[in-house]
Amino acid sequence: MSLRFEELAWRQTPMGEISLRRRWDATVDADVYEVKLGDEFLMSSLFTVAEIELARLGLAEVVGDDLEVVVGGLGLGYTARTVLEDPRVHELIVVDALDEVISWHQRGLLPFASAVVADPRSRLHHGDFFAMNATGFDPQQPGRQFHAVLLDVDHSPSHLLHPSHAPFYTADGLRRLADHLHPGGVFGLWSNDPPDDAFTAVMAEVFDGVRAQVVTFANPLQRRTSTNTIYLGRRPSA
């Protein structure tokens, strides 16, 4: 058994103090990795089902091979790792606004990080996903389009980590996002909240086949089933 609790990394950022912690959880009899931003828990390795499903559901909507994918938000890397498990993926760009998070993976502080860092198809980019939505997600190739963009940064479209993210969740913001997709390309969004009919309607102004899929998973801490939501939409082909 490892140490009961250890803070692996800590840093002051423009959005507050961010820390990576490892603790032994007797409930699951395993190490649990957690990320906190200030007093808020951003993510935990206890709850990864929806992050994995964001990649699986998003890529299941994409037709073809040699897929080029963007993941907004590296976190503990579960979405990125699942993207790379799809043999059709040719290239993955992961964008994260916190270079410290990227450093955790590159320094091997997370024992499962090598699956993303060492894969020659993946590239970790330090940048603001929401600012890059105006210019493009590949600084080396402006105007580049992708087959899928999968986003997991804010808690939900209405519960944001920073007020500057709000314009993204409007019809205009989503139209700019759609410009970065090939025709038929897929946008996927993780949310901690139940489906929001108002946001689904905004997505439907821009994308085809919009749906909000509820993902259920066991919550061992609360001894109940919890849910997250995955929003999906496809850029019109014509």
Image: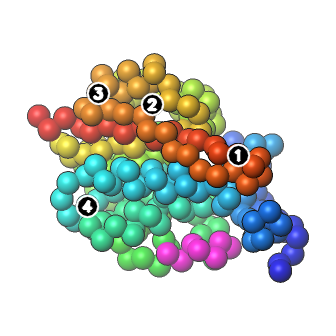
Q: Is residue 67 left or right of residue 25?
A: left
Q: CA distance from mark 1 to mark 3?
A: 36 Å
In this rendered view, identify the residue nearer to me: 198 or 42: 198
Mark 3, other Cα within 10 Å: few <14 / some 14–19 / many ≥20 = many
Mark 1, other Cα within 10 Å: few <14 / some 14–19 / many ≥20 = few
| Quarter of the figure that contains the C terminus | top left
Q: Is residue 205 magenta?
A: no
Q: CA distance from mark 4 to mark 2?
A: 24 Å
Residue, x 27% and y 39% (percent of image)?
Answer: 234
Looking at the rendered structure, which numbered label has been put on residue 67? 4
What kind of residue is marked 2?
A: Phe
Q: Provide the residue span drawn in magenta.
A: 109-115
The residue under label 2 is: 168
Residue, x 19% and y 35% (percent of image)?
Answer: 236
Q: Earlier in the sequence, mark 3 or mark 2?
A: 2
The residue under label 1 is: 224
